[in-house]
Amino acid sequence: MEEERSDPNLQTETLDLDADLQKKHQAMLDRLSNRHQARLDNSLARRSDSTNTSESTSSFLSRFSESKQSIDSQLADSRLIAQSDPSRLKSHFTNISSSISDLEKLVAENSYFLPSYEVRSSLKTISDLKQNFEILNSELIPKKKFSFKNKATAKKELPKEPEPAKSDTDSISKFKIPNSPGFRNKTNETLVKKFKGTETGEFTLSDLDSCEVRLIGCCNAVFMNRLKNCKVYLGPVIGSILIEEVEGCVFVLASHQIRIHLAKRCDFYLRVRSRPIIEDSNVVRFAPYCLDYEGIEIDLEKAGLSEETGNWGNVDDFKWLRAVQSPNWCVLAEKERVGKVLVRILVAEMKVVKDCFCNEGL
């Protein structure tokens, strides 16, 4: 019998094949290891994000609770002050009003990461505090009765303090419009304001009829009350926008929080970090923000509103608690929306030069 001999070429090929298999096997192990590590990193990142959001919410709730307790304590002290030292009441109520405004700003500044139910709960708490404040204020500091003394002085003061006729909505008014800079009591006018540098406080629009308002730049908060048939174009608002008793208006607004009360037949073009809130409103329509002017991107970045969140179409109707869609608002059909609204202003003269609209429907 012939002795079997091994083929050296075959042996070399086998060794080469084993080496290739080992390389492929090692490469596969490396890929699996890298994939596993990536999954671990992603999991840790998600846990970190969740922890940060949870910590932020917890921190907000703690600050909110402390501020509310402080305001409750101030309200409770009001009657004692009225009995012991009535002269302190006005300054005491001024401090309470300021504390409530600070609490409202706290909600606006943190609303972008808070769950919607926390925002609603916080706003309801603030509304209750305001109502309690107004009740105490009217009870402990009643209006002065009519007097025949100092007739000449009374005549001089009459033009300064006119008493407008009360409307049906006065009894359910939610917001106290502050005595901040703004435009008031105007009809058929174009009103222009460009905010500069430190000029970023609160701004008020009140009792306007058939006016066009253009506010360029950033400010902290905007309050609107009793507007009719107006067009309002606003640059980014760092805090909140509160709107009450408006009818037949078009609003182009960007803000962290927008709350609307007593609005009828109005269109809102919004960019907002939290969900817009409507209350006691009907026939209101919503679409995305469409304002443009030189430097708006810088202003949006400064206000923390550079990204479109899509919340313009996620509206909360506080007077509609059913699971189905509220009949009081809807998304504005694309064919009915205005195009890009471009506002140009001569800064030196504060004079409107030209508005360019891609859609002539506005």
Image: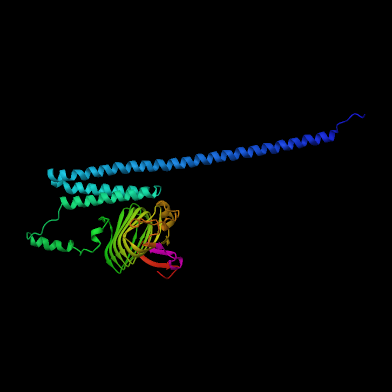
Q: Is residue 361 above or below residue 35?
A: below
Q: Is residue 81 above or below residue 343?
A: above
Residue 295 visible within the image: no
Q: Residue furthest bottom?
A: 360
Residue 59, horizontal then vertical, whole percent: 36, 41
Residue at 69% x, 37% y: name it: 25
Position of residue 353 in the picture relative to residue 160 (left or right): right
Residue 329 visible within the image: yes
Position of residue 358 in the picture relative to residue 198 (left or right): right
Residue 144, horizontal then vertical, whole percent: 12, 56
Q: Quadrant of residue 161?
A: bottom left
Residue at 18% x, 61% y: name it: 160
Residue span colored magenta: 330-346
Q: Quadrant of residue 71?
A: top left
Q: Depth check: give the residue in front, 221 or 197.
A: 221
Residue 261, horizontal then vertical, whole percent: 31, 59
Q: Is residue 334 magenta?
A: yes
Residue 186, horizontal then vertical, whole percent: 27, 66
Q: Residue furthest right?
A: 1
Q: Quadrant of the C terminus?
A: bottom left
Q: Quadrant of the N terminus?
A: top right
Q: How is the image coloured?
A: rainbow
Residue at 31% x, 63% y: name it: 246
Q: Is residue 167 magenta?
A: no
Number of marks present in the image shown: 0
